[in-house]
Amino acid sequence: MEGKVKKVAVEEAEKIKSMTVQAARSGAYLYPLRGIYYFVSHRALWKPLTSKLLPSLGLGTAITVGMFVFTYVPQAALMAFTQGPLAAVGAAVLVLSESSELFTLASKTFLIQDALVDTFDATLVNKNTTDLVSSGRQIQSGGDSVAKLGRMIKQPFAKYSPSALIRYLMYLPLNFIPVVGTIMFVLLQGRRVGPAAHTRYYQLKGWNSSQREKHIEEYQVAYTSFGVVATLLEMVPIASILFSFTNAVGAALWAADMEKGPVTEHGTSPQLREQAKKAE
């Protein structure tokens, strides 16, 4: 029995190692970082964010402060039984993740839904993939990339689904396992967040569910690596609102590379692949 357990553990470790190598080679994890640079360097993309900045900052601050005041100490006390001296750090990570999830649920449902779509579409317009965007909304002449965005034809990003919240709650207990549990939690969140970042892209392409699933399965490792970095960025208190927009930009840059080609077997541009090799 002990030998079988060791064998399974070794197989799982090898599988994780292989996936980690594939993720590193894909370079997809660089897109959220590219999104930050691209967003900062293109002022026109700031418009959707600035229109929602104050209410979003207020909401994010209230949620994060409230979660630390009311839930940090009880969760740290519980985690002390399994993590010992690491409980303080583990509980902080957990509260930040919970705050981020609550903020995402509230903001994307009530505040920034349309603004994120505008940011995604405007980035695609900037990257000369206007034909793709025109399948989902009217494109006007003149002005910057945001000013060119007209009326929606297709539904934007799907709103935060109950199933995503259920999965999040199912994964939460992993944080009670020292170090490894928190890493597993972030990986599982990344596995969900990655494909979700391209929901608008799938809609613009007009793909049905089977086409989406086939595409996601083909690039699952790359999507997970993108999702892990995006998740970590959106866990930053208060600044998570900014990173929600930069992640949308990063997702659009990736979609533009997929559209314009050529792309590698991981669905990323060759240039990004070379950057990933240099970073290894």
Image (cartoon, helix red, strand yellow):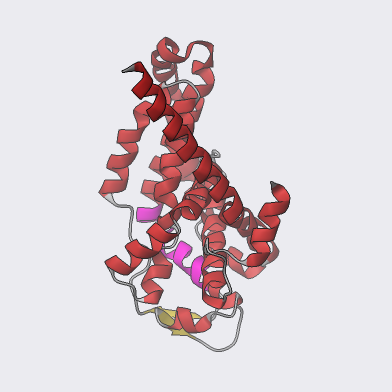
Left/right of residue 232 with respect to residue 9 in the rendered view = right
Q: Residue at x 40, y 75 (%)?
A: 204
**Relative height, residue 164 to residue 157 (above, below):** above
Q: Looking at this view, is 195 or 270 the one in front?
A: 270
The prevailing secondary structure element of the residues shown in magenta is helix
Q: Which residue is drawn at 71% across and 48% down?
A: 279
Left/right of residue 268 with respect to residue 99 in the rendered view = right
**Relative height, residue 276 to residue 121 (above, below):** above
Q: Looking at this view, is 268 or 254 the one in front?
A: 268
Q: Which residue is drawn at 66% across and 53% down?
A: 276
Determine if the magenta segment contains residue 112.
yes
Residue 59, can we see it?
yes
Q: Looking at this view, is 12 or 247 the one in front?
A: 12
- Residue 194 placement (x, y as % from top left): 45, 53
Q: Residue at x 47, y 20 (%)?
A: 178
Determine if the magenta segment contains residue 123.
no
Q: Looking at this view, is 256 or 159 the one in front?
A: 256
**Relative height, residue 185 to residue 105 (above, below):** above
Q: Give the range drawn in magenta.
A: 108-121
Left/right of residue 270 with respect to residue 55 in the rendered view = right
Please identify the quadrant where the N terminus is shown.
top left
- Residue 260 placement (x, y as % from top left): 56, 77
Residue 64, can we see it?
no
- Residue 48 placement (x, y as % from top left): 52, 64
Residue at the farthest bottom position: 141
**Relative height, residue 123 to residue 179 (above, below):** below
Left/right of residue 204 with respect to residue 235 in the rendered view = left
- Residue 31 placement (x, y as % from top left): 59, 57
